[in-house]
Image (tube, rainbow, N blue to C red):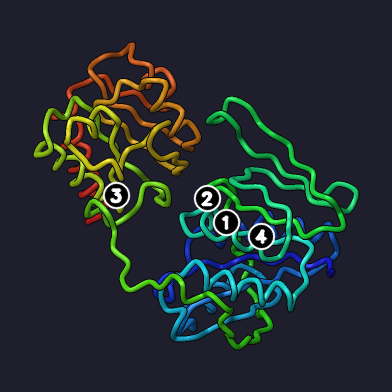
Amino acid sequence: MSNDVLIFAEQRDDRLHAAVAQIATPARAVAGKLGGQLVACLVGDKLDQAAEALARTGVDRIVTVSDASLAMYSALRYRTALAAVAAKVAPRVLLMPATFMGRDLAPRVAARLRGALATDVIDLDVVEGALRVRRPLYNGKALCQVHFPADRLAIASVRPNTFPAAAAGGAAARESLAFVAGAGDERLSTREIVRTGGAVKDVTEADIIVSGGRALKSEENFKIIYELARELDAAVGASRAACDAGYQPHSRQVGLTGKTVTPKLYIACGISGAIQHLAGMRGSKVIVAVNTDAEAPLMKVADYAVVGDLFKVVPALTEEVRKLRH
């Protein structure tokens, strides 16, 4: 086992996922403390643009596994490819984004490599030559500190939007590894990837989210949320009450029984802020709340609380954003 740190550089259609540059920041710090290199693994097909973007994150070395069968994400094939790179690099630590893909892939790779795994971590350090991480429990009410054994591969998925993006561009050594499918990899095959609910972005991976609550009163009225989201290049979210009422699909539900999000900006429109909803978005960097009730729970935790009618405030905000953009 070397002292290198390996990161899984998630890409989609040859576009590097934004979370990769973010996890490169703590990965570089961990590699420095271990005295090893920062190595990145790209898996897919036609990876030229993703490799160029990856080099700009300051990694020392890039290993690509390119094959036509890897053009679309397949849990079993990607597991085999990443495990092969890990066997070649023999890293002390393997990090990946805690995205949909990362959450699906991490336990599979850990099982294949017999590594120790911690998920959704928000802090990383090296103590006595071994990785130590912290991860939230009970929707952020408590933190768990995990110490990895020094003689075992440490694998962790890192929560997006937790660390600043690395921008230490440089020349990275590049090499490729031929993909050799494993026995049983064909048990699952991906024929098509579609997005649920018609949203361009998923709320768990967006930097900006505009969410609406039951106060929108109908699915038709959600168009003002979509208009603001479009101007901000944001994802659309919804409270459980709005989803249960049929205003939005449950794939957009933010909260304890929905999806946990950590965007840079969260705009809540007409959401009172029940404890279940707060648990799912409390990690947002900046929270803006629009509500007629100044005493609503979400208004009390918001960085910016706007007391007013969302049907007036949101269109006005959309118009101001449009002016700034155009």
Q: Residue furthest top?
A: 295
Q: CA distance from mark 3 to mark 4?
A: 40 Å
Nearer to us: label 4 or label 1: 4
Pointer 3: what residue? 232
Nearer to us: label 4 or label 2: 4
Q: CA distance from mark 4 to mark 1?
A: 25 Å
What's the mark number on residue 160? 2
Question: Residue 96 appears at what percent x and percent y?
Answer: 60, 59
Residue at 44% across / 43% down in the picture?
A: 263
Nearer to us: label 3 or label 4: 4
In which quarter of the view is residue 87 placed? bottom right
Which quarter of the rendered picture does the C terminus lie within? bottom left
Precedes in sequence: disc 1 or disc 2: 1
Q: Secondary structure at mark 3?
A: helix
Residue at 41% across / 25% down in the picture?
A: 276
Precedes in sequence: disc 4 or disc 1: 1
Crowd rating for badge 3 (residues with CA inside 10 Å; few <14, some 14–19, many 20+): some
Callout 4 amino acid: Ala
Which quarter of the rendered picture does the N terminus lie within? bottom right
Residue at 73% across / 53% down in the picture?
A: 116
Precedes in sequence: disc 3 or disc 2: 2
Callout 1 amino acid: Gln
Q: Secondary structure at mark 4?
A: helix
Pointer 4: what residue? 111
* Horizontal side of residue 230 vs 116, given as left or right: left
Pointer 1: what residue? 22
